[in-house]
Amino acid sequence: MFGGGSGSAAINSALCKIVPELCSEYNVIHICGKGNIRQNNINGYRQYEYIDDMGAAYTAADCAVARCGSNSAFELIANKIPTLFIPLENKASRGDQLQNADYFYKKGLCRVLRQRELTPENLLREIKNTIEDANLEKNLEMCDIQSGNAKIIAEIEKVIGI
């Protein structure tokens, strides 16, 4: 679970209220942002201000809860991780996160919880729905969105004459 580079007060607050129940069934990695770690002794719950190796976090993830910036969205979908997106709303962003979430939702590649509907109860329900959504998993497996690294490297090699 992560809410962007500096964390998300709204997501952090909702998660804080459900993490004991969530950890009765699942392990949770929570990237909460700088200065947002809260002391706890909940078994199966780990908080980090920041993670340098998101690849390792993605590898460990069976499901994700995240904002819906383009980098995070494409990384999660390319890695075929069932994701519940909670996009920043228009007043807090340019509106691009809502557009990203809508785009991927219409393709059946994610679930979406609007921030105005974010409550601890809704978050818990939607996390469970995301984990149990067989159609979402099937759509992600069939999705052909891939990392663009090979294309980027090929373009660089073309420019420098390799």
Image (tube, rainbow, N blue to C red):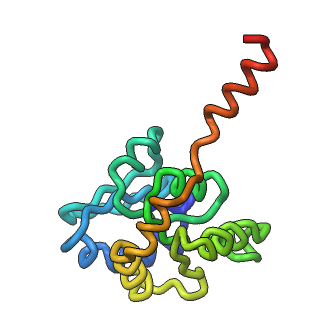
Picture mark count: 0
Residue 68 falls in image quadrant = bottom right
Question: What residue occupies the far top of the structure in this picture?
Answer: 162
Any part of residue 9 in sight: no
Position above or below: 9 against 4? below
Across and down, in percent, residue 17 comes to 35, 79
Residue at 43 percent of width and 78 percent of height: 14
Residue 28 falls in image quadrant = bottom left
Across and down, in percent, residue 119 comes to 47, 86
Q: On the rendered structure, is 32 left or right of 115? A: left
Residue 72 falls in image quadrant = bottom right
Any part of residue 162 in sight: yes
Q: On the rendered structure, is 127 left or right of 161? A: left
Across and down, in percent, residue 69 comes to 65, 59
Position above or below: 13 against 29? below
Residue at 75 percent of width and 27 percent of height: 155
Q: Nearer the viewer, residue 110 or 71?
A: 110
Position above or below: 79 against 127? above
Residue at 54 percent of width and 68 percent of height: 109
Q: Nearer the viewer, residue 67 or 145?
A: 145
Quadrant assignment for the N terminus: bottom left
Quadrant assignment for the C terminus: top right
Question: What residue occupies the far front of the structure in this picture?
Answer: 142
Residue at 52 percent of width and 64 percent of height: 66
Across and down, in percent, residue 37 comes to 39, 58
Position above or below: 57 against 160? below
